[in-house]
Image (tube, rainbow, N blue to C red):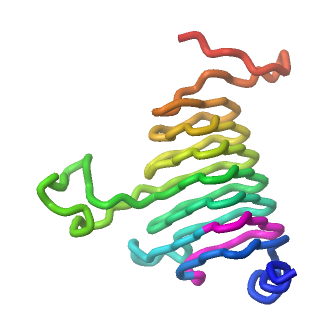
Amino acid sequence: MFSLIYTKLFFPQARIIRLPFDIRNKNLIKIGKNFTSGFGCRLEAHALIPDVKYSIEIGDNVQINDYVHIAGGERLVIGNNTLIASKVFISDINHGAYSGPKHDSPLQPPNDRELSTRPVFIDENVWIGEGVCIMPGTTIGKGSIIGALSVVTKDVPQNCIAVGNPAKVIKVYNFTSNVWEAVKS
C-alpha cells in the first residue's frame, strides 16, 4: 500500500514503483506512462554532457524488476514495451577512457579517472533477461531478446536473440516462416 501511495504522489504517470526505490537527479530522468519497478531498483542520472535535457529516458509500458541499476550520464534510452528482468545493469558511463584518442593509465586509481560516456539505445519490445549487463555505446534493436547473464558490448540488430559474454546473436526471427531461426556460424 505504501508503494502505491508513493507512486501516485511522486510518479502519477507510473503504474507502480515498489519500495525501496532509489532515484538520483530525478530532473534528468524522463519516465513514461505505466512504468513498473520491482524492489530495490536504482536510477541515477548525471549531467555529464552540456545541454542534455534527460540523461535517462524510459518509454511507456516499461517494466523493470527487482534490483535493476540504470546509470546515465549522456543519453540512455529505453523504448516502449520493454521488459527487464531482475539484477540487470545498464549504463552509458565508464570510469575512464579505454578507446579512441585518449586512454587512461592503469596506474591511475579508477575513482580518479574522468568519467566517459557513450550513448545506449534500447528500442521497443525488447526483453532483457536476468543478470544482463548492457555496456556503454551499445544499441539493442526492436523486438530483440537478450539471454540471461549476457554482457552486451556491441550492437544487437532488431528481431534477434543474443546470449553470452560477450553477447552474440544466435537466432533471428524469420517473418516469412514465423519462427526463430538459428544463425549459422
Residue 47: percent from left, percent from top: 44, 77
Q: Nearer the viewer, residue 98 or 75?
A: 98
Q: Residue at x 59, y 69 (%)?
A: 42
Q: Residue furthest bottom?
A: 9
Residue 81: percent from left, percent from top: 78, 53
The span picked out in magenta is: 26-41
Q: Residue furthest right?
A: 1
Quadrant occupied by the N terminus = bottom right
- 104 above or below 55? above
Q: Nearer the viewer, residue 185 or 21?
A: 21
Q: Is residue 7 left or right of residue 28?
A: right
Residue 107: percent from left, percent from top: 12, 56
The part of the image, by quadrant, that contains residue 143 is top right
Q: Is residue 126 left or right of residue 98?
A: right
Q: Is residue 138 left or right of residue 140?
A: left
Q: Residue at x 26, y 55 (%)?
A: 97
Q: Nearer the viewer, residue 142 or 130?
A: 130
Residue 94: percent from left, percent from top: 36, 58
Q: Residue furthest top?
A: 184
The answer to whether residue 30 is magenta is yes
Q: Residue at x 44, y 52 (%)?
A: 136
How many numbered markers are drawn? 0
Q: Residue at x 47, y 56 (%)?
A: 119
